Image (cartoon, rainbow, N blue to C red):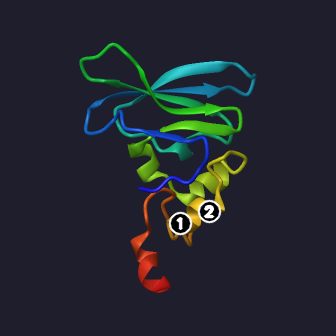
Amino acid sequence: MINTIKGLNIVSMIGDNKGTFQAITKTPAGFMTAYEIGSELPSLNRWKKGALQTIQFRPEGSKAWLTVFARKGTKVILMDLKIAEALEVGTVNQLFYNTNLYDQGQYQSMRAKTWADKVFVINENNLEKSC
């Protein structure tokens, strides 16, 4: 995994742990609301543009919530490795185009050519085409 986006910290808190995820979103009225979203790794494209603010993870057997995705204004400042590995160019282009995640240099370093390509994982299918 390669990260060339300035200000984005990649952490590894989820790993192979099982647990529960919680999302904190901004409602159309402008206030924040938190709700549990289950035990599966959440896809960032399940919310409307600008709604998702934070994702937290509580490992089984723990009472503490760990922040695994955090947004501050137009900057995503923290993302867990598992979320980063699953993030696709199309999700960024549709929902995070006004944030620091929208970075053509990052896309190029990962050989991303389509919206289905990954943002933080080298896209091997494009490796053969570029050689």
Q: Residue 105: which numbered mark, if any?
A: 2
Quick one: which residue is furthest to the right in this view?
Answer: 29
> Can you tell which quarter of the image residue 73 is in?
top right
Above-or-below relation of 120 to 49: below
- Residue drawn at 71 percent across, 38 percent down: 74
Which quarter of the rendering shows the C terminus?
Answer: bottom left
Give SS at disc 2: helix
Residue placed most toward the observer, 68 or 94: 68
- Residue drawn at 37 percent across, 38 percent down: 12
Q: Residues within 10 Å of mark 2 (few under 14, many from 20)?
A: few
> Can you tell which quarter of the image residue 115 is in?
bottom right
> Can you tell which quarter of the image residue 18 is in?
top left
The CA distance from mark 2 to mark 1 is 6 Å
Left or right, 100 with respect to 66, comes to right
Amino acid type of the residue tagged 1 in the rendering: Ser
Q: Which residue is mark 1?
A: 109
Left or right, 20 with respect to 108, comes to left
| Residues at discs 2 and 1 in contact (Cβ within 8 Å) | yes
At which x and y percent is residue 116?
51, 64
Above-or-below relation of 92 to 34: below
Give SS at disc 1: helix
